[in-house]
Amino acid sequence: MFEGKGFAVPPSPARVRGPAVGIAAILAAAWTSLAPASAQNTVGYVLDLSGEWNLYAGGAEDPHAQPIAKWQDLPAGGVLRISTPATTDFVTIADRVGVIFIQKSCRERSDCATPVFLPSAAAAPDGGVTVLNSVWKLLWGDPYQQSLHRVRGLTAYMGEGVAQISDGKASLRPIMQSLAKGTYSLASYGGQGGVGTPFQWDPASNDPVTVGSEAPGLYEIALVAPADKAALSKDVSLRVLLCAPPQYNEAATSFDKAKALTASWGSAASRSTVHAFLRAYLAGEAQGGNACAKML
């Protein structure tokens, strides 16, 4: 998705404290109650937040406060204010290509006394903006799409990746090399659940695993039973996009760039935020109509 479209991984962002001009802000807690900003009017997206932040879409003189929520798109010219700041409150905002340019912390409450002003206009669109449009839309979608990318807080091991599939065999070592030997399942992922195809995984083997008649597409890998019966069984959730050989290298390279983007967020993004973003990215690829795609 990033390949050949002018996407560049940004340097790690600097922390922003106090007044911030040239910022992307936050939007409605009840995403069904607000219309999203138009693509041309969007200046950024909420990566994460804590506290009761409000958007004044019409600017500093706008009397109408709209509560904001994670992943919401942010309109140009708006202003953000927090109702009653606590020392644990914060907001983190990324621009349309995923670069964090606002980190507002209320660790010192006085830092949140000043409003956050959004840029008056969005930057000219480029390839990176187009690339991530589908990711933001999936993350800030209807209830079905939100459940599609929900990250389970109690999952012991989570991961995402791209793997090659050919003649009923999948090369899963890049995303499963740290997992213990045992029986796992590969289930087509579309938010509907269902029984997956069981397969045997041995980290000591370099051979692709047999997955039967499964086709390219988006899948969920889960642990069925560890080979070591005395071992403590842990919850596993791997989201993998299986691609045919001609498309695998491009898809894997593109996904690596998405991972590099999330790595640039550092401690500004939680583990669940990173996993949700990468899973939405893979879902966007799976819906793209290429040889990695399968109906969701």
Image (spheres, helix red, strand yellow):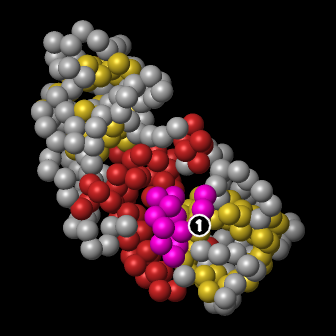
- Left or right relative to 180: residue 273: left
Question: Was residue 67 drawn as part of the magenta stretch in this picture?
Answer: no
Question: Which residue does the image show at 59% across and 74% down from the upper left?
Answer: 216
Left or right position of 226 against 171:
right
Q: Residue furthest right?
A: 229
- Asked if one can make out residue 93 in the rendered structure from this viewpoint, the answer is no
Q: Residue furthest top?
A: 63
Q: Residues within 10 Å of mark 1 (few under 14, many from 20)?
A: many
Q: What is the count of numbered marks?
A: 1
Name the residue carrying label 1: 294
- Quarter containing the N terminus: bottom left
Residue at left 73%, top 53%? 193
**Is the stretch drawn in magenta largely helix, strand or loop?**
loop
The stretch in magenta equals 282-296
Judging depth in this view, the residue of 199 and 4 nearest the camera is: 4
As displayed, is residue 257 above or below residue 17?
Answer: below
Q: Quadrant of the C terminus?
A: bottom right
Q: x, y (%) of residue 38? A: 28, 38
- Residue 69 location, x and y as percent? 42, 30
Q: Is residue 191 left or right of residue 9?
A: right
Helix, strand or loop for disc 1:
loop
Q: Quadrant of residue 165?
A: bottom right
Q: Nearer the viewer, residue 51 or 217?
A: 217
Give x and y (percent) for residue 98. 30, 52
Q: In front: 187, or 19?
A: 187
Q: Quadrant of residue 175?
A: bottom right
Spot occupied by residue 140 in the image (x, y as percentages of width and height): 44, 40
Locate residue 150 relative to residue 254 in the image: left or right. right
Q: In the picture shown, does residue 85 fall above or below 250?
A: above
Name the amino acid, label 1.
Lys
Residue 138 appearing in the image: yes
**Rendered residue at 33%/67% (across/down):** 2
